[in-house]
């Protein structure tokens, strides 16, 4: 198994996620043990409402785990200062920006904030990283355009470039393919695969594009109501995990093609 | 990206226009003074009539400097609030800083008869008004902030700001009911706003607080820019949201509070100038916006003041009326073209 020698970027130990208020704890998933390795593209899939967003929110330190711990590069997430966490973990979220009146270059350059001085001046090193990020995502031509001029697909690429410019070991994307057409869904996920391979970054994304994830990901994390499993797509298929992902009355998983079919 | 050189050129042009506005402002007034004598009195050379030098040095110059501080300070605090609250209609006035200041001043001027004792000890000097206005504005803004921490919806925050304004307005009404005619007049005159009341000493204090506020604003440029992406992104960039939020609020209350304290509640500048600047410069980058808002704010205030003076007449219109007369159409224009407005 080639995975064993690979450096682990993020791992969780006995992680329980959910919401706690004064009155009660709502556990959404428990005993999650996952390892994310360097240079891997990892897809997180599961039905609506199963807790993908909660897991991502917990992994990105937006909400606290109920139990267990998350370690990044062997160090507990809680022990990171905000600024140091920003140097190992960058995000691409589903929320839209309140202001779209920045140029693509300015947007991507915001990714350099954890490294810049108190007024945020860009050094030569920063500019180099920004240009690299623009190059890797193929949006150099757009760099002088304002964000409101971009299509959804272009904006998503710019947001990915911003995360790349942040120069972190781990990039987490929350449903990066929503609102995109079929071509751009494939394009963005293919781009993520290329980035993971070329930059040796670990990229975790949640998605409903299970077919594409099976074809492109090194590892897939499947959330079902009883368990959270992570493995290589081919192993997951042979274990029959995808067969039980959804209620069987409407769609079924075809193991030969690795895709879902509507039951006629 | 428009190159930095292009921005630099626009800034130089704007700065020159600002100097022109400044000269225009001090050369206009109830008394006609020839341009040559205006320059002479600025550089300290004797003028044809001694009174001219006195007018320029002790009246028109401090007034022009006050206009620059007021216009730029209100514009920038409006910009800070709009970015912080992610709402293009936010501003110092909407969120209750001015009404907070009004409440403070009303308590000092009108409340002295009500509460007697403790307040009677405080002379109704300019300083007690300044302190009361600052405290009032800070308290109201903090209240709005505390409530807004629990509510994420930005429109709700605006409504809450309006509610606080209503509460303060109601208290002021009650105080007015018990106030004497003389006190009422004093309060109403404060509400007209005035740029011409400050001596050089007072201007000095004003300037020091203004500089502190400005330094805080400049140190917030980086966090303001990351807030353009939304709070979750800003946090993921390592920004300490609570600390930056507090810095922005303190900067705003120092600037807007002091301005309201020294010059009265000047309307609309804080709302209109940032929008004007965004439309003209077509960017949300605060590194560009901050100096641009400074220049536009100072310029517009100097022009408003020049108009309020009604050149060569003895009338001086309330500055607050002039800023609203110029500001309100801008706000209406913004609402009309809202679909195109990029925030």
Image (cartoon, coloured by chain):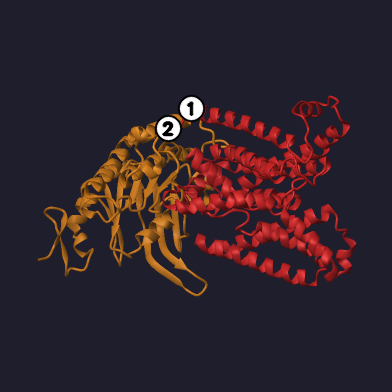
Among the chains, which one is orange?
A
Query: Residue A32 placed where, x, y %?
Result: 36, 59
Q: Is residue B254 above or below residue A24?
A: above
> Residue placed farthest to the left in the image?
A264
Q: Residue A128: image x %, image y %?
A: 43, 29
Q: Quadrant of residue B168?
A: bottom right
Q: Which residue is denoted by mark 2 in the rendering?
A: A129
Q: For this view, does A190 lie left or right of residue A169?
A: left
- Front in this rendered view, residue A200 or B265: B265
Task: Give the label on residue A187, or none.
Answer: none
Where residue B274 appears, x then y in whole percent? 56, 45
Q: Chain of mark 1?
A: A
In the rendered view, tell whether residue A191 sits above or below residue A18.
Answer: above
Counting from the top left corner in percent of width and height, residue B190 is at 76, 56
Q: Residue at x 59, y 44 (%)?
A: B220
Q: Chain of mark 2?
A: A
- Classify 10 Å Cα crowding around label 2: few (below 14), some (14-19), many (20 and above): many
Colour chain B appears in? red
Q: Residue at x 74, y 36 (%)?
A: B26
Q: Would residue B245 be seen by someone viewing this image from the given angle?
A: yes
Image quadrant of residue A73?
Answer: top left
Q: Quadrant of residue A3?
A: top left
Secondary structure beneath label 2 = helix
| C-alpha gap between disc 1 and disc 2 | 9 Å
Depth order, front residue of A24/A145? A145
Query: Residue A124: which numbered mark, if any?
Result: 1
- Residue extending farthest front: B313
Answer left or right for B144 relative to B40.
left
In the image, residue A190 above or below residue B12? below
């Amino acid at each position: 198994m080639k995975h064993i020698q690979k450096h682990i970027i993020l791992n969780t130990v006995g992680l329980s996620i959910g919401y706690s208020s004064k009155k009660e704890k709502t556990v959404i998933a428990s005993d999650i043990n996952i390892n994310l390795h360097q240079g891997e593209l990892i897809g997180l899939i599961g039905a609506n409402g199963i807790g993908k967003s909660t897991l991502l929110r917990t992994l990105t330190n937006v909400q606290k785990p109920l139990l267990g711990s998350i370690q990044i590069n062997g160090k507990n997430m809680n022990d990171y200062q905000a600024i140091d966490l920003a140097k190992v973990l960058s995000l691409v979220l589903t929320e839209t920006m309140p202001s779209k009146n920045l140029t693509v270059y300015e947007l991507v350059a915001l990714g350099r904030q954890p490294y810049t001085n108190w007024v945020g001046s860009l050094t030569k090193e920063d500019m180099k990283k920004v240009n690299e990020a623009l190059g890797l995502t193929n949006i150099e031509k757009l760099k002088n355009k304002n964000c409101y001029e971009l299509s959804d697909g272009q904006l998503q690429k710019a947001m990915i470039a911003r995360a790349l410019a942040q120069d972190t070991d781990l990039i987490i994307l929350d449903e990066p393919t929503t609102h995109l057409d079929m071509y751009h869904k494939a394009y963005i996920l293919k781009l993520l695969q290329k980035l993971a391979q070329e930059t040796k970054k670990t990229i975790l994304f949640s998605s409903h594009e299970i077919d594409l994830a099976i074809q492109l990901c090194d590892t897939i994390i499947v959330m079902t109501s009883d368990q959270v499993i992570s493995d290589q797509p081919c192993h997951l298929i042979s274990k029959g995990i995808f067969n039980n992902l959804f209620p069987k009355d409407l769609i079924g998983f075809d193991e030969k093609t690795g895709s879902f079919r509507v039951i006629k | 990206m428009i190159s930095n050189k292009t921005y630099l050129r626009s800034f130089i042009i704007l700065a020159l226009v600002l100097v022109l506005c400044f000269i225009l402002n001090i050369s206009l007034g109830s008394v006609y003074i020839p341009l040559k004598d205006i320059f002479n009195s600025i550089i300290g050379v004797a003028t044809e009539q001694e009174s001219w030098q006195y007018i320029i040095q002790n009246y028109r110059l401090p007034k022009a400097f006050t206009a620059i501080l007021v216009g730029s300070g209100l514009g920038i605090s409006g910009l800070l609030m709009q970015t912080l609250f992610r709402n293009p209609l936010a501003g110092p006035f909407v969120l209750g800083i001015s009404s907070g200041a009004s409440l403070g001043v009303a308590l000092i001027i009108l409340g002295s008869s009500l509460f007697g004792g403790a307040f009677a000890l405080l002379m109704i000097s300019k300083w007690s008004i300044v302190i009361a206005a600052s405290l009032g504005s800070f308290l109201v803004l903090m209240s709005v902030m505390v409530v807004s921490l629990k509510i994420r919806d930005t429109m709700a925050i605006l409504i809450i700001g309006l509610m606080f304004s209503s509460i303060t307005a109601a208290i002021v009404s009650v105080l007015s009911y018990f106030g004497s005619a003389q006190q009422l007049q004093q309060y109403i005159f404060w509400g007209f706003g005035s740029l011409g009341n400050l001596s050089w000493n007072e201007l000095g204090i004003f300037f020091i607080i203004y500089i502190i506020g400005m330094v805080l604003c400049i140190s917030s440029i980086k966090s303001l820019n990351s807030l353009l992406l939304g709070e979750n992104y800003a946090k993921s960039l390592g920004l300490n949201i609570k600390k930056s939020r507090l810095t922005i609020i303190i900067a705003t209350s120092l600037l807007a509070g002091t301005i309201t304290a020294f010059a009265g509640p000047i309307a609309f500048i804080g709302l209109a100038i940032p929008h004007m600047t965004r439309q003209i410069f077509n960017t949300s980058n605060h590194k560009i916006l901050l100096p641009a808002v400074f220049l536009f704010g100072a310029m517009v205030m100097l022009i408003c003041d020049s108009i309020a003076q009604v050149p060569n007449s003895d009338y001086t219109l309330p500055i607050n009326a002039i800023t609203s007369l110029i500001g309100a159409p801008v706000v209406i224009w913004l609402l009309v073209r809202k679909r195109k407005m990029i925030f």
